[in-house]
Amino acid sequence: MGGAAENEMVVKQDLKVVAEVRRFVRLVTGQWDMDDFVPCLVASELVTNALQHGTSVTDNDVILRLSRTEDDALWMEVQDAACALPHMLAADTTSETGRGLFIVDQYARCWGIRALADNAGKIVFAVIDRT
């Protein structure tokens, strides 16, 4: 990851914080001279998912981390304290929810989920190409 300091944001338990998440992503991607549209979209979806599904369990924080991969793509991960793993829903066209991971799946090069040890929660990650 180039040894650069990790860019990390602790997300407050409030869906209005998604605007702050987008600001943070714009700031970081701007420093890396990277377009911010897709990173903002993916971060919004992952953080919203974590806030909706990951925080009812405890009052533990949701943490967003951004870094770069070896080939200069964006590595994004969102950590929360819930152990339940998210899954892609077959969202219909009128549904208000259920599209988050579908959007991530469309825009990210790859994404996945890894459980933390001792039922401490999970990390959902996505890799986003520069262009």
Image (cartoon, rainbow, N blue to C red):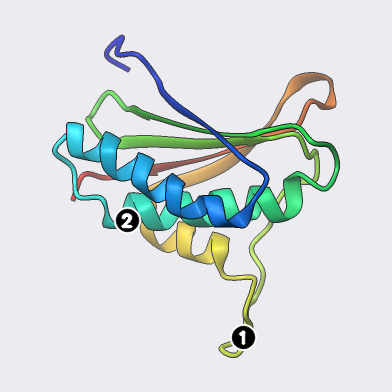
Residue under the point 76% across and 44% down = 55
Residue 1 in view here = yes
Residue 17 versus residue 81 in the image, above or below: below
How many C-alpha atoms fall within 10 Å of the one at disc 1: few (<14), some, or many (≥20)? few
Residue identified by numbered label 1: 92
Q: Amino acid at mark 1?
A: Asp
Residue 128 in view here = no
How far across and down, in percent of the image, does residue 82 sit? 78, 40
Residue 129 versus residue 79 in the image, above or below: below
Residue under the point 79% across and 36% down = 59
**Viewer-side residue, 90 vs 8:** 8
Left or right side of 107 for 50: right
Q: How many marks?
A: 2
Residue 15's quadrant in the figure? bottom right
Q: Amino acid at mark 2?
A: Val
Residue 87 versus residue 82 in the image, above or below: below
* Disc 1, SS: loop
Q: Residue furthest left?
A: 33
The tag on residue 20 is: none
How far across and down, in percent of the image, does residue 44 sit? 48, 54
Residue 67 versus residue 73 in the image, above or below: above
How many C-alpha atoms fall within 10 Å of the one at disc 2: few (<14), some, or many (≥20)? some
Are the two marked residues, 2 and 1, in contact with CB atoms closer than 8 angstroms? Answer: no
How far across and down, in percent of the image, does residue 14 sit? 64, 51
Residue under the point 39% across and 19% down = 6
Residue identified by numbered label 2: 38
Residue under the point 25% across and 39% down = 29
Q: Residue furthest top?
A: 3
* Disc 2, SS: helix
